[in-house]
Structure formats: C-alpha cells, structure tokens
Image: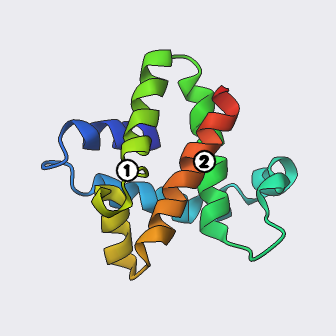
C-alpha cells in the first residue's frame, strides 16, 4: 500500500493530497499491527537511546517494502527517487511538511521518519 500511495501521489500530488497522510497512518499503526514480527525479527531497529515507535515502524516498513521492490528495479528506483527528493531538501519536502504541520512536529522529525523508511528499503536492496 505504501508503494502505491507514494507513486500515485508523486504522479498527481494535486489530486492525491491524502496519500502522504495515509502513509503516515500506515506507519503509525504498523508497530502495533506487526508487534510480534518486529520484536522477533527486527530487534536491531530498537535504538540504545530513546525509544521511538514511529521511527522503528518506518524502518521495518521500509524493509518490508524493499521485499516487494526487489521484483522491479524500475519501481525500486522510482520509490527511492521519491523518498530522496523528499529528504534531500528538507524545507521543500511536501510530504514532511504535511506530516509536520498535521502533527505539530518539527520538520526534521518528519524528515527523520522518511529517512528511516528510505533506510529500511536501501539496506535490503543493497
């Protein structure tokens, strides 16, 4: 679902304004939905410092997305380009700006979630 939401939003952001919020909703619920899987197979995502359920969810979700992206290099490149364009220039990231505004977060926190999602994808694909 995350792949579909990212690509459809990137193709028509003016018509697909809810897609970034939907992606964040998936990330927000992923930890509880996949709790056993995360504890059993992704314990390495738990930081030594402060526990952040959203960051862990984004990273593990990225790993799961990567399993699907392995089947299509073209789609993998597309998804990574979307994430890269939304993390490289923080002040101009439509996704991060929307997440930050809707949740009253600092922009760098929203960027961090996108970075975790991207990082989870990259570590599996590379």
How far across and how far down the image is residue 117, in percent? 56, 49
Number of on-image labels? 2
The N terminus is located in which quarter? top left
Which quadrant holds residue 18? bottom left
Local packing at callout 2 (Cα closer than 10 Å; few below 14, some 14-19, many 20+) is: many
Across and down, in percent, residue 16 comes to 21, 49
Q: Position of residue 116 (x, y in %)?
A: 59, 53
Is residue 121 visible in the rendered structure shown here? yes
| Residue lying at 79% horizontally and 65% vertically, measured from the top left | 47
Give residue 86's mark: 1
- The image's mark for residue 61 is 2
Kindly indicate the quadrant of the structure image that contains residue 22.
bottom left
**First in residue order: circle 2 vs circle 1:** 2
SS class of the residue under badge 1? loop
Task: State how the image is colored.
Answer: rainbow
Question: What residue do we see at 56% from left, 17% from top?
Answer: 71
Residue 36, percent from left and from top = 79, 56
Q: Nearer the viewer, residue 37 or 21?
A: 21
User: CA–CA distance between discs 2 and 1?
Assistant: 17 Å
In which quadrant is the C terminus drawn? Answer: top right
* Residue at x-position 43% and y-position 37%: 3
């Amino acid at each position: 679902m995350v792949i579909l939401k990212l690509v459809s939003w990137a193709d028509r952001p003016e018509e697909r304004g809810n897609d970034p919020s939907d992606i964040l909703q998936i990330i927000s619920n992923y930890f509880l939905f996949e709790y056993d899987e995360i504890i059993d197979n992704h314990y390495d995502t738990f930081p030594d410092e402060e526990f952040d359920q959203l960051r862990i969810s984004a990273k593990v979700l990225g790993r799961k997305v990567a399993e699907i992206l392995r089947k299509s290099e073209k789609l993998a490149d597309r998804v990574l380009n979307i994430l890269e364009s939304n993390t490289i220039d923080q002040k101009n990231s439509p996704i991060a700006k929307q997440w930050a505004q809707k949740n009253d977060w600092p922009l760098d926190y929203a960027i961090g979630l996108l970075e975790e999602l991207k990082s989870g994808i990259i570590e599996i694909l590379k």
